[in-house]
Image (tube, grey):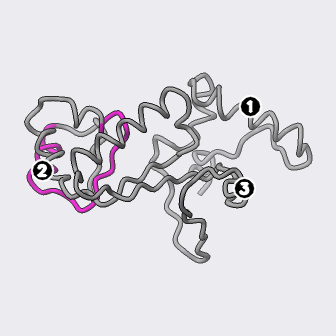
Amino acid sequence: MRRYTGQENQEERRRTAENPPDILLTNFMMAELLLTRQDELDAKIIDNANGLEFIVLDELHTYRGRQGADVAILVRRLRNRCSPDRGPICIGTSATMASEAQLDKAGTFASPFVTRIEPGKAFYPAEACHQDYATLHPDQPYIAFNDLPKIGNLSRLFPDLYRPKARLVADNASSN
C-alpha cells in the first residue's frame, strides 16, 4: 500500500512508479492529474493501474453538485483507461449517509452496499493533520458549509448532550 496524493517528494513518486503497490491511496484531484499530466512518473503510475479492480470513494456525501459530476467523469475515465474490458467495482463510503432503508426506498443505488459494523476491531486514528481539524480551521469552506451547521443543529436538538467546548485530541495527548 502506498499513498500518492501530491504530497510526496520525487524519490517517493519514483519508488511508487518502479514498485507498484497492490493498493494505491490517492484523492480525486491527484487521480485527475495522473490521467492528464504528461509527467513520465505519473504516466508509469497510471500504466501500473491497468487491470484496476476497485475504485473506492471515501466521504461520498461530500461529492455533490459540480464536484460530484467531476468525480463521476473521473471514475468513467479511470474505468476506460485502466479496465476497459471489465469495469472495476466502484465502492462509496461515508459515515454520514442516509440509512440503507432510506436509500432503498428512494431507489438511490442499483445494487446493495456494505453496511456491516464489526465489533472488537482495532481503531486507527486519523493522521495528525486531520486531528481537531474543524476546531483549528472553522473558516475552511468545507467546515463552514458542512460541519458548522450540523454542530449548530446538534446544540439545538440535543442541548443536554451538547458541549460548547470540544474535546480535542491534542488536549488528551498532552494530559497523558
Query: Tag 2's secondary structure?
Result: helix
Relative depth, front residue between 116 and 81: 81
With 169 as the anchor, is 42 left or right in this view?
A: left
Q: Which one is earlier in the sequence, the residue at label 1 or at label 3? A: 3
Q: How packed is label 2: few (under 14 Cα within 10 Å), some, or many (20 or more)?
A: few
Q: Position of residue 42 (x, y in %)?
A: 16, 38
Q: Nearer the viewer, mark 2 or mark 1?
A: 1
Give the CA distance from mark 2 to mark 1. 43 Å
Relative depth, front residue between 4 and 167: 4
The residue type indicated by label 3 comes to Lys
The residue type indicated by label 1 comes to Pro
Give the CA distance from mark 2 to mark 3. 47 Å
With 155 as the anchor, is 146 left or right in this view?
A: left
Give the CA distance from mark 1 to mark 3. 27 Å
Task: Identify the image quadrant of residue 70.
Answer: top left
Which residue is the site of mark 1? 149
Which residue is the site of mark 3? 105
Q: For the point 16% across and 43% down, which residue is it?
A: 13
Q: Which residues are magenta?
A: 10-31
Which residue is the site of mark 2? 15
